[in-house]
């Protein structure tokens, strides 16, 4: 009997993660069939995408409310198909607000439901763990401190490591990257990553540019790299350069190439998010910053459990890199924090060593470990 697996992946990151998992599962089940909601990378692995994963990309509470009826309709239709077709298992990849409801209904129908990527219950909305316990047959966690949280409430759980740790080299090729970008090795470089979303770039572009201006007053030889993910975000940053009469500053915008920019940099200024973890895996000292709407910041700060927002600090359980958020994210404060890194080689070396330890802890061959945890629910023993 052919094993059939229903899957839902949200956004581009979920599509990539799920595609690696499909490939790993096919090593044990070459004839397995996969269907549900997914993206082009999953489709390249033979996935039957009945809806594209881009449909699940929502940006903030307002967008989620506006699209609630649309997304609920898709979810109900997919549930009807799952109940009718009776796949061997269901795997939800990230997208917890969409997947947890669906996983609970699937599990109630007698189909194992696995969730890949734990929601950040350790950061906020910890009460979700009760709903998770009712919804999932197994949780797959990316971070080593997460399994204990699920074990306390009796949820079967496996730590599988973080996929970025498998992809990123333990020793980044800094000299080669600088040569490719035509940057002399002796030049001091700061990478500035204002985020991948348009709202993030709008909130941070002006202060990033003013930060660069302040630093150049102290050291005119500095150079800046600004990787931007889309044409829209590049246009927003370019408009900010013109608005601030800063087109003559040595700020080089890159179309994508965020990893190259961070690899080449001496220090990174980064909007909080996955990019801060990427910077840590590249062993780069950094300053983490973020600005959002005042009411949203107050709400999230009230609901947060941890003293940090950046993944490097959370994973190291220590404030090893500065976090300058909201009203503290002034150009003067950002410039001072970046300059502190540039002027202290021993501090840079110490944080690079910590990040190497972190990289080794997260490097677990994620797709293989995840597949091996899922196989028992498919009635298959790992090879």
Image (cartoon, rainbow, N blue to C red):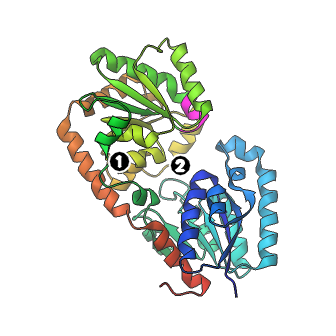
Q: Is residue 301 magenta?
A: no
Instruction: Determine the image quadrant of residue 108.
Output: bottom right
Question: Mark 1 or mark 2, which is nearer the start of the sequence?
Answer: 1
SS at mark 1?
loop
Tell me where residue 345 sits by quadrant.
Answer: top left
Kindly report which numbered mark, 2 or 1, lies closer to the viewer in this rendering. Answer: 1
Identify the mark at residue 282; answer none if there is no mark.
1
Q: Dot 2: what SS?
A: helix
| Snapshot quadrant of residue 6 | bottom right
Asked if marks 2 and 1 touch (Cβ < 8 Å), the reply is: no
x and y percentages locating residue 323 in the rendered image: 38, 38
**Other residues around mark 1 within 10 Å, as few (<14) / some (14–19) / many (≥20):** many
Report, in whole angstroms, how far the alpha carbon at label 2 lies from the one at label 1. Answer: 31 Å
In this rendering, does residue 228 appear at all?
yes
Q: Is residue 188 left or right of residue 229?
A: left
Which residues make up the magenta segment?
Answer: 196-202
Residue in view at x 23 percent, y 41 percent: 348
**Is residue 219 depicted above or below 77 in this figure?**
above
**Viewer-proximal residue among 148 and 178:** 178
Residue 68: horizontal and vertical position, in percent?
Answer: 77, 51
Tell me which residue sits at (47%, 39%) in the image: 257
Q: How many neighbours does mark 2 have within 10 angstroms: few (below 14), some (14-19), or many (20 or more)?
A: few
Quarter of the figure that contains the N terminus: bottom right
Whether residue 293 appears in this view of the structure is: no
- Numbered mark located on residue 303 in the image: 2
Going 44% across and 25% down the picture, which residue do you hit? Answer: 252
């Amino acid at each position: 009997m052919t094993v059939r697996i229903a899957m839902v992946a949200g956004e581009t990151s979920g599509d990539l993660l799920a595609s690696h998992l499909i490939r790993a599962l096919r090593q044990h089940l070459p004839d397995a069939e996969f269907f549900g909601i997914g993206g082009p990378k999953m489709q390249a692995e033979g996935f039957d995408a009945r809806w594209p994963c881009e449909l699940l990309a929502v940006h903030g509470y307002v967008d989620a409310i506006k699209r609630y009826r649309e997304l609920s309709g898709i979810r109900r239709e997919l549930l009807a198909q799952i109940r009718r077709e009776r796949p061997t298992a269901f795997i939800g990849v990230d997208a917890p607000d969409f997947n947890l409801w669906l996983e609970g209904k699937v599990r109630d129908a007698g189909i194992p439901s696995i969730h890949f990527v734990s929601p950040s219950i350790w950061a906020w909305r910890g009460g979700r763990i009760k709903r998770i316990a009712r919804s999932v047959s197994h949780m797959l966690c990316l971070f080593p401190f997460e399994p204990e949280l699920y074990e306390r409430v009796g949820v079967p759980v496996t730590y599988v490591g973080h996929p970025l740790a498998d992809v990123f080299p333990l020793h980044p090729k800094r000299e080669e990257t600088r040569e490719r970008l035509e940057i002399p090795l002796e030049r001091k470089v700061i990478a500035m990553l204002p985020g991948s979303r348009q709202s993030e770039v709008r909130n941070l572009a002006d202060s990033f540019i003013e930060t660069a201006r302040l630093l150049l007053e102290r050291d005119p030889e500095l150079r800046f790299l600004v990787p931007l993910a889309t044409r829209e975000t590049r246009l927003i940053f370019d408009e900010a350069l013109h608005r601030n009469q800063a087109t003559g500053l040595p700020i080089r915008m890159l179309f994508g190439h965020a990893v190259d920019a961070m690899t080449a940099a001496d220090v990174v200024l980064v909007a909080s998010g996955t990019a801060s973890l990427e910077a840590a895996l590249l062993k780069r000292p950094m300053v983490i910053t973020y600005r959002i709407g005042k009411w949203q910041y107050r709400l999230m700060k009230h609901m947060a459990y941890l003293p940090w927002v950046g993944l490097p600090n959370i994973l190291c359980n220590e404030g090893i890199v500065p976090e300058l958020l909201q009203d503290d994210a002034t150009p003067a404060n950002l410039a001072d924090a970046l300059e502190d890194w540039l002027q202290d080689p021993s501090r840079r070396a110490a944080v690079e060593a910590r990040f190497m330890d972190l990289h080794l802890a997260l490097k677990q061959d994620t797709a293989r470990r995840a597949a091996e945890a899922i196989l028992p629910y498919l009635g298959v023993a790992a090879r």
